[in-house]
């Protein structure tokens, strides 16, 4: 019958397709190795609005040659205080390093308490303890991790990113770019890479 003939052709086609698929899977690698970048510096800062319990993290990442890798802003809601805001910004800095696929990271921020807690290996029992533990878990993604305190004056650009993101209630991620809203806010003066 005609249906048996069609069925035979379909079975033959299915067998051929399965054979080809098997060949493709045998020839293809099961995992792809992505080359990881060297040392990266990530600056972080935060802005907080106590009226609506919202905050934003501002981040800038540079490579070891001083080239801009990324700028990022992440908005947060239901934030209790500025201290928690800074801790979330530190966590976002670590996550940015993971996203960029780097081996070594220097995380720089102007919150002495957060930097100090991130440097410690002991269990933190403060209000930001869970966030600090999350940072400590994520830091295992790197061969080397260093947390460095920097003065506010050297962190103005990340603060501007955070402040503008909070004002607009807008998150973003840009590779090798500075958002126009930030350029306007700092008068088109963009920082030179860290030493």
Image: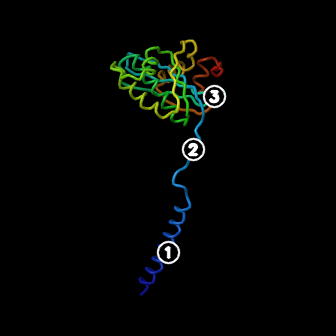
User: Nearer the N terminus, badge 2 or badge 1?
Assistant: 1
**102 or 14: nearer the viewer:** 102
- Between the C-alphas of marks 1 and 3, the distance is 55 Å
User: Nearer the N terminus, badge 1 or badge 3?
Assistant: 1
At a point 53% along the width and 12% down the height, the residue shown is: 152
Give the number of the mark in front: 2 or 1.
2
**175 or 33: nearer the viewer:** 33
- Between the C-alphas of marks 2 and 1, the distance is 37 Å
Image quadrant where residue 124 sits? top left
Tell me if mark 3 has few (under 14), some (14-19) or many (20+) residues whose alpha carbon lies within 10 angstroms of its own.
some
Tell me if mark 1 has few (under 14), some (14-19) or many (20+) residues whose alpha carbon lies within 10 angstroms of its own.
few
- Give the residue furthest to the bottom: 1
Q: Are marks 1 and 3 in contact (CB under 8 Å)?
A: no
From the viewer's perspective, is 116 left or right of 181? left
Whole-percent x, y for residue 167 in the image: 48, 21
Residue identified by numbered label 1: 13
Q: Is residue 29 above or below residue 55?
A: below
Whole-percent x, y for residue 149 in the image: 52, 16
Quarter the C terminus occupies: top right
Residue identified by numbered label 2: 34
Q: Is residue 154 above or below residue 68?
A: above
**Label annotation for residue 64:** 3
């Amino acid at each position: 019958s005609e249906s048996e003939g069609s069925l035979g052709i379909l079975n033959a086609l299915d067998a051929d397709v399965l054979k080809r698929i098997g060949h493709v899977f045998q020839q293809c690698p099961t995992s792809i190795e992505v080359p990881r970048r060297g040392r990266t510096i990530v600056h972080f800062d935060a802005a907080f609005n106590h009226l609506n319990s919202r905050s934003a993290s501002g981040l800038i990442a540079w490579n070891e040659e001083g080239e801009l890798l990324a700028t990022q802003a992440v908005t947060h809601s239901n934030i209790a205080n500025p201290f928690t805001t800074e801790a979330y910004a530190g966590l976002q800095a670590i996550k940015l390093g993971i996203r960029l696929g780097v081996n070594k990271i220097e995380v720089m921020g102007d919150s002495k308490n957060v930097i100090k807690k991130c440097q410690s290996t002991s269990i933190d029992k403060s209000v930001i303890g869970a966030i600090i533990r999350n940072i400590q878990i994520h830091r295992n993604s790197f061969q080397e991790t260093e947390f460095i305190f920097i003065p506010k004056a050297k962190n103005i650009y990340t603060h501007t990113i955070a402040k503008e993101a909070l004002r607009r209630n807008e998150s973003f991620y840009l590779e090798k770019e500075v958002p126009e809203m930030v350029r306007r806010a700092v008068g088109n003066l963009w920082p030179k890479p860290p030493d």
